[in-house]
Image (spheres, grey):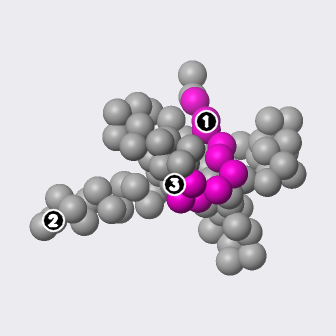
Amino acid sequence: TQVFAFTDIKGGSVNNGFIKALGRYDFQLFSNVNLAFLVNFILGELDLEEAIEETQGETFKVFYCNDAVRVASEELDDL
């Protein structure tokens, strides 16, 4: 079973709490989520890969946190 977390503000207290948990638990975290994105995801109109692709566009403001946390962690490991 996959677990997903959606937060409204990147850098907000709820999002930061989930980012801390990414190191301990396996789940997918999206921030800056709007209602349209959330409804499309819940109704199955977007699967995980499509949702991540949506976050890659410059005009789309939803942020997929897992990749950013992984990159930051790798950079810290290199220090």
Residue 73, magenta (yes or no): no
Tell me where residue 35 appears, x and y as whole percent: 84, 49
The segment highlighted magenta reads 3-12
Numbered circle sitting on residue 4: 1
Quadrant of the frame with the N terminus: top right
Q: Vertically, is 54 above or below 57?
A: above
Asked whether, in this view, residue 54 is left or right of residue 23, the answer is right
Q: Residue furthest front?
A: 13
Numbered circle sitting on residue 71: none
Q: Secondary structure at mark 2?
A: helix
- Circles 1 and 2 in contact, beta carbons < 8 Å: no
Label 2 Cα neighbours within 10 Å, binned few <14 / some 14-19 / many ≥20: few
Residue at position x 21%, y 62% in the image: 76
Q: How many marks?
A: 3
Q: Vertically, is 21 above or below 49?
A: above
Disc 1 marks a residue whose amino acid type is Phe
Numbered circle sitting on residue 78: 2
Quadrant of the frame with the C terminus: bottom left
Disc 2 marks a residue whose amino acid type is Asp
Q: Residue furthest top?
A: 1
Closer to the camera in the image, 15 or 35:
15
Residue 5, magenta (yes or no): yes
